[in-house]
Amino acid sequence: MVAPSFIHLRVHSSYSLTQSTLRIKSIGDWAVEGKQPAIALTDKSNLFGALEFASTMGDFGVQPIHGSVLRFKSILGPQSLGADDDELLLLAQNDVGFENLMSIVSQGFLEANGGDPILSLSALSKRTQGLIALTGSLESSLGKSLSQGQTNVASEHLDWLQERFPGRLYIELQRHGLPQQRDLEPKLFEVAYERGIPLVATNAAHFLDATQFKAHEALMCIGQGTTVHDENRKTLTAHHYLKSPEEMGRLFSDVPEALNNSVVIAKRCSYAPPKRDPILPSMGSSEEEIHTLTNQVKAGFDEQWEDVLKAWPQDEDRDALRKVYEDRLEFELGVITKMGFSGYFLIVADFIDWVKKEWHSSWSWPRFWSRVFSGLLA
């Protein structure tokens, strides 16, 4: 088998909501067709597709690399860059790294307060083991500071990252045809060679090929609540697709080490989350679950019976009518208990009851959903 010349390390799927049209199966099909041994999934601020990605790539015989593009409150503070967030791409090397990545992503939703997850530094500082960090995009603190000529800020930023990702930090080079990227690139070369930080070539993939660019533009407009005629909307370029290794080879022919390092990083990552049964809270033995569910359902039926009667004429045979409902109730309960779903229905009922209580005690949507996520992760 011919050794790979480039591995994609920044790929967004449809789990990056309204930001990508790539489905996980289509990513696998692309990898098999291009004889790619590995590929990364790096959805923005989430790991929603991790299990599906691992399973699908396993079926295709492709090594899955798990990561996420995360946003952090600026490492050096908003006063340094005039911005309050920093973008960092994290890839899991092993089970420890994936556990840390899950913790970081979960913390992001807990801190979101109803908006997009922007993490505090404390969420990152103590959870860097087993993770590889890629920085250098225009949205990162490094990219912003170098673009603004703030070399001292860039230096402090890299000090902070190198301390937490020793031997696991790479500076990204991206060439999507943007003039800002062309202007930034010489500065990235300079700091990378000065500090001995390896370079890596990436291409942020949001759709399958260049022909899907216009469709992707429409998707982004839906996400932003705007139209394609809005000149101030956020947009990508026709180069944000899954380019072949040959295309990437031509694009970065002057920086072969950046291409090779994408393969090096892929070899450093060797983890896929295993399939496992759902971890559900215990509601007692099977007999106890059936007994509890039956009692709750029948109690609820009795409470609702008077409302049911109001919808029927007074001259109806009420006893016969009740018998119809009771028979249907027994049938439904029988289906649930025979399938072993009694505990599941009790858990869902518990969630609903909790949400109803919390809704009345929560004064705002952000606070309410924050408490919902806290309850689910507790």
Image (cartoon, rainbow, N blue to C red):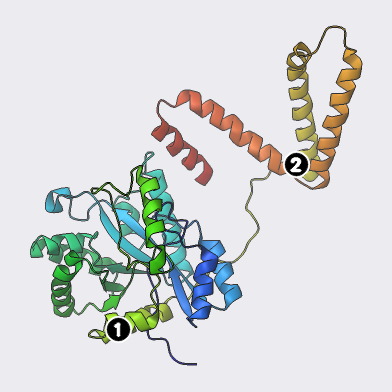
Q: Name which of mark 2 and mark 1 comes first in the sequence.
A: 1
Of 272 and 1, the residue lying toward us: 1
**The disc label shown at residue 24, or none:** none
Q: CA distance from mark 2 to mark 1?
A: 59 Å
Q: Residues within 10 Å of mark 2 (few under 14, many from 20)?
A: many
State the residue at coordinates (42%, 58%). Answer: 20
State the residue at coordinates (27%, 86%). Answer: 256
Where residue 28 sits in the image (x, y, percent)?
Answer: 53, 72
Task: Give above or below for 322 relative to 193.
Answer: above
Q: Secondary structure at mark 1?
A: helix
Question: 33 left or right of 135?
Answer: right
Q: Are marks 2 and 1 in contact (CB under 8 Å)?
A: no
Where residue 103 sits in the image (x, y, percent)?
Answer: 43, 55
Q: Quadrant of residue 321?
A: top right
Question: 23 left or right of 167?
Answer: right
**The disc label shown at residue 250, or none:** 1
State the residue at coordinates (36%, 44%). Answer: 111
Question: 221 left or right of 310?
Answer: left
Q: Is residue 129 visible?
A: no
State the residue at coordinates (13%, 78%). Answer: 194
**The disc label shown at residue 342, or none:** 2
Task: Give above or below for 136 relative to 295.
Answer: below
Task: Give above or below for 315 relative to 276.
Answer: above
For the residue marked with disc 2, what is the amino acid? Ser
Q: Secondary structure at mark 2?
A: helix
